[in-house]
Every structure is written in C-alpha cells, then in structure tokens.
Image: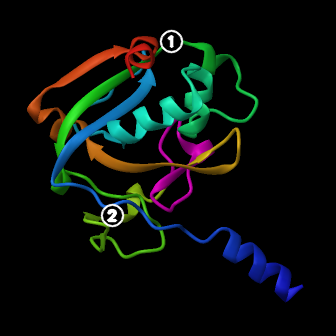
Amino acid sequence: MISLLLLLVSAFACEPLADAPESFQVAWVSPISRSVRARAWLEVVRVTDLRAWIHERGTDPVRLLQGLGMVGRKPKARAHKPYKVTLFDVKRDWLCRPVSDKEPGTDVSGVAVCEAPQHKGLCRHKKGYTGCGYTLDTESSIRGLDVFRVRWEVASALGFCVMPLERFLSGA
C-alpha cells in the first residue's frame, strides 16, 4: 500500500519549468463573449510555446482547448463556441507562476510564484489545472504548456491585439 502511494506521489511530482526571458509575448485564449475587469487575473501562455504546440499537433480548435486544459476529454458544446486569442507584450516582472507547492514570491525559472489566491484554477482552466505552473492536456493526460498569471491592467499597458482563434490557428 505504501509503495503504491509513493508511486502515485512521484507520478504527480511537478516537472521543471522553462526560463522566462526579460520580455516576450503571451496569449490569453478565451470565449469571444468573455470580458474581464481591469484588476482581473488572466491565465496566459507564451506565444512561442502555443505556436510550437499548434505546429506539432495541428489546428483543430477543440484539440487546442484540450491542450490548454480548458475543456475536458469529451468536450461539450462550450468547446465549439467561438473563441478569441488576445496577445500581449509583457515583461517577466509583471507575471507570476501558479505553483502551489512553493512560497509566494519565490523565484521559479525567473518568475515569482503567485500569491495564495492565485494558486487555484481560474474559470475555464480548472480541468487542466495542475498547481505546477503548467497545464494538463486533458485529451492525452500529459503535461501541457507553461502558464503564467497577469492582471489585465498590467498586461494591457503596452497594448494588445485580439483575433478569432481560427485566424490565429491559420497563421500560426
């Protein structure tokens, strides 16, 4: 029994995260109808990681939503609703990582760990939330993309670009 528990714990141990450059582009994927207030937190991924995922796995929007942990293995109607991608230029210091087993403010691969309220899955990301700073690909049950959290008011400081998910997928 104890060996089974040790096996399960080691199977769910967090994997290392990629270093974050000083500044880079991030993407927030959300339903077209979703809006947020200025102080709301967004869960974002690096655009380069997102594009690499698309090149490797294809341009199916539902499959991408599963890769981001936003819909389950058997996606319901909401996965087939229209989504948008909002792109931001950000600085590393504006972000935090949702890593639940580290102290808030601790540096993890160049980015501080989020404060305790941000250690939980955000709306529409709970299915793939790991608490490790990356998503769970809900279709294949493997590690997904590294994620960050940022407030809208901070992320939008340098401007942003919004486009339908399908357009982003066709140009990735």
Amino acid beneath label 1: Pro
**Position in image of residue 123 (x %, y %):** 50, 38
Q: Are marks 2 and 1 in contact (CB under 8 Å)?
A: no
Q: Which residue in the protein does label 2 denote? A: 115
Towards the viewer: 157 or 7: 7
Q: Position of residue 15 (x, y in %)?
A: 52, 67
User: Which amino acid type is marked by label 2?
Assistant: Glu
Residue 35 visible (yes or no)? no
Query: Taking 70 as reference, is 12 above or below it?
Result: below
Q: Is residue 172 above or below residue 20?
A: above
The residue at the point 59 percent across, 20 percent down is 60
Residue pictured at 44% horizontal, 17% vertical: 165
Using residue 52 as the reference point, say whether residue 106 is left or right of it.
left
**Residue 67 visible in this rendered orientation of the protein:** yes
Q: Which mark is residue 82?
A: 1
Q: What element carries label 1?
A: loop
Q: Give the range drawn in magenta.
A: 121-135
Question: Residue, x 27% and y 65% (percent of image)?
Answer: 112
